[in-house]
Image: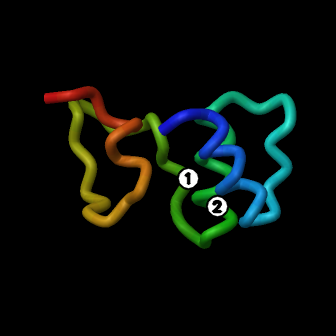
Amino acid sequence: MKIQKVRSIAKTKEVNSSRMSKGEIIRAVQEAEGNFPCFGTARDGFCDQKDCMWKEDCLPPG
């Protein structure tokens, strides 16, 4: 997902995304949604979050 789309989603969640990296913004959005801020933290390419909208950007292609 492009950074412009990520920033747009952040804005709808009232997350101030200025001066934040893409990963930081996504983790802030995850927290704002009441979810665990896990973006980019999966080990060995394993993620148990089946319905995560960030999964494609988070995990390496495999």
The image position of residue 39, as x and y in percent, is 48, 43
Q: Please tell me whether mark 1 sits on a helix, a strand or a loop.
A: loop
The image position of residue 53, as x and y in percent, is 41, 57
Q: What is the C-alpha distance between the residues marked 2 and 1?
A: 6 Å
Q: Could you tell me if the residues under marks 2 and 1 are in contact, i.e. CB atoms within 8 Å?
A: yes
Crowd rating for badge 1 (residues with CA inside 10 Å; few <14, some 14–19, many 20+): some
* On screen, residue 41 above or below 51: above
Left or right: residue 31 versus residue 18 is left
Please name the residue shown 22% across and 30% down the image.
Answer: 44
Please name the residue shown 26% across and 63% down the image.
Answer: 50
Q: Please tell me whether mark 2 sits on a helix, a strand or a loop.
A: helix
* On screen, residue 19 above or below 47: above
Q: Quadrant of the C terminus?
A: top left
Residue 31: image tag? 2
Mark 1 lies on residue: 37
Question: Depth check: 3 or 45 in front?
Answer: 3
Q: Earlier in the sequence, mark 2 or mark 1?
A: 2
Question: Depth check: 28 or 56 in front?
Answer: 56
Crowd rating for badge 2 (residues with CA inside 10 Å; few <14, some 14–19, many 20+): some
Please name the residue shown 77% across and 57% down the image.
Answer: 11
Left or right: residue 23 versus residue 18 is left
**Which corner quadrant of the image does residue 30 belong to?**
bottom right
Please name the residue shown 43% across and 37% down the image.
Answer: 41
- Amino acid under label 1? Pro
**Which corner quadrant of the image does residue 49 belong to?**
bottom left
As drawn, the residue found furthest toward the bottom would be 34
The image position of residue 32, as x and y in percent, is 69, 65
